[in-house]
């Protein structure tokens, strides 16, 4: 019994160490974010990035549609962060720091779509989160981290690293929507990584 208890304690400590950043408040946030990201993959969502007029703040497209950014937006909403509001407020004051004019030809912020675009989220996370190195070392990517990729055809993509591991135990899995609805998949190094961030709120 004593040996079994030691094994159980060691197992639980190993799980905690996987996601612990050494601060109770941060760890609680990361646990909640990972849980929210996993929960998103239980929803039936058709991949659809159509422009829609949505409420503000806390606006969302219909629950049965979404794209990669919506996995991130909806996960952060579950932990009390409204990226629609956060991105829009920063873009109102710092529009030229974002690529909206260069990429989409916009001349002002648009609260309906700005937060649903990967390049805008990248700028926001660079400004208010922590920008981390892009490497091929799996241990550099921790649960709760945000990763962006460039898919074939120059399509930007984003996902959330979770605490589950690949079958070979080498890589953490990612919660994302690459076109088949929200999924948890072993795809961290499948495409060219363009960004690596941690964001725990302002």
Image (cartoon, grey):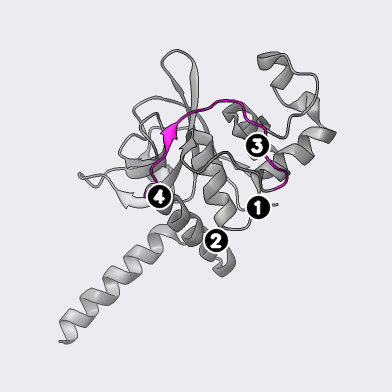
Which span is picked out in magenta? Answer: 42-57
Helix, strand or loop for disc 2? helix
Q: Is mark 3 on a helix, strand or loop?
A: helix
Provide the residue designation for mark 1.
Answer: 201
Compare marks 4 and 2 and give the one earlier in the sequence.
2
121 or 49: nearer the eye? Answer: 49
Please identify the quarter of the rendering in which residue 7 is found. Answer: bottom left
Q: Is residue 27 magenta?
A: no
What secondary structure is found at the residue carrying circle 4?
Answer: strand
Name above or below for residue 107 compared with residue 30: above
Marks 4 and 2, how far apart at CA:
13 Å
Give the residue at x 38% y 45%. 139
Q: How far apart are marks 1 and 4 (CA)?
A: 18 Å
Mark 2 Cα shell of 10 Å, populated few (<14), some (14-19), many (≥20): some
- Asked if residue 4 can be seen in this view, the reply is yes
Give the mark nearest the N terminus, 4 or 3.
Answer: 3
Task: Label 1: state its secondary structure.
Answer: loop
Percent x, y for residue 6? 23, 79
Question: Where's residue 33, x and y in %?
Answer: 50, 55
Give above or below for 29 relative to 12. above
CA–CA distance in space, label 4 to label 3:
20 Å
In front: mark 4 or mark 3?
Answer: 4
Marks 1 and 2 close (CB-CB < 8 Å): yes
> Where is mark 3, residue-wise?
126
**Residue placed under numbered mark 4 in the picture:** 162
Q: Mark 2 points at which residue?
A: 29
């Amino acid at each position: 019994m004593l040996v079994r208890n030691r094994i159980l304690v060691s197992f639980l400590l190993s799980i905690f160490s996987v996601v612990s950043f050494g601060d109770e408040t941060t760890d609680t946030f990361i646990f909640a974010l990972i849980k929210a990201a996993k929960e998103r993959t239980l929803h039936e969502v058709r991949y659809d990035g159509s422009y829609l007029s949505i409420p503000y703040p806390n606006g969302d497209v219909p629950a049965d549609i979404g794209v990669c950014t919506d996995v991130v937006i909806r996960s952060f909403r579950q932990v009390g962060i409204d990226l629609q509001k956060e991105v829009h407020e920063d873009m109102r004051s710092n529009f030229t720091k974002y690529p909206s004019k260069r990429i989409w030809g916009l001349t002002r912020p648009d609260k309906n779509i700005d937060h649903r675009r990967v390049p805008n989220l990248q700028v926001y996370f660079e400004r208010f989160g922590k920008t981390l190195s892009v490497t091929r070392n799996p241990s550099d990517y921790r649960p709760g981290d945000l990763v962006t990729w460039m898919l074939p055809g120059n399509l930007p993509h984003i996902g959330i690293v979770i605490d589950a591991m690949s079958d070979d135990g080498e890589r953490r899995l990612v919660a994302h929507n690459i076109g088949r609805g929200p999924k948890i998949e072993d795809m961290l190094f499948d495409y060219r990584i363009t960004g690596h961030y941690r964001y725990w709120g302002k």
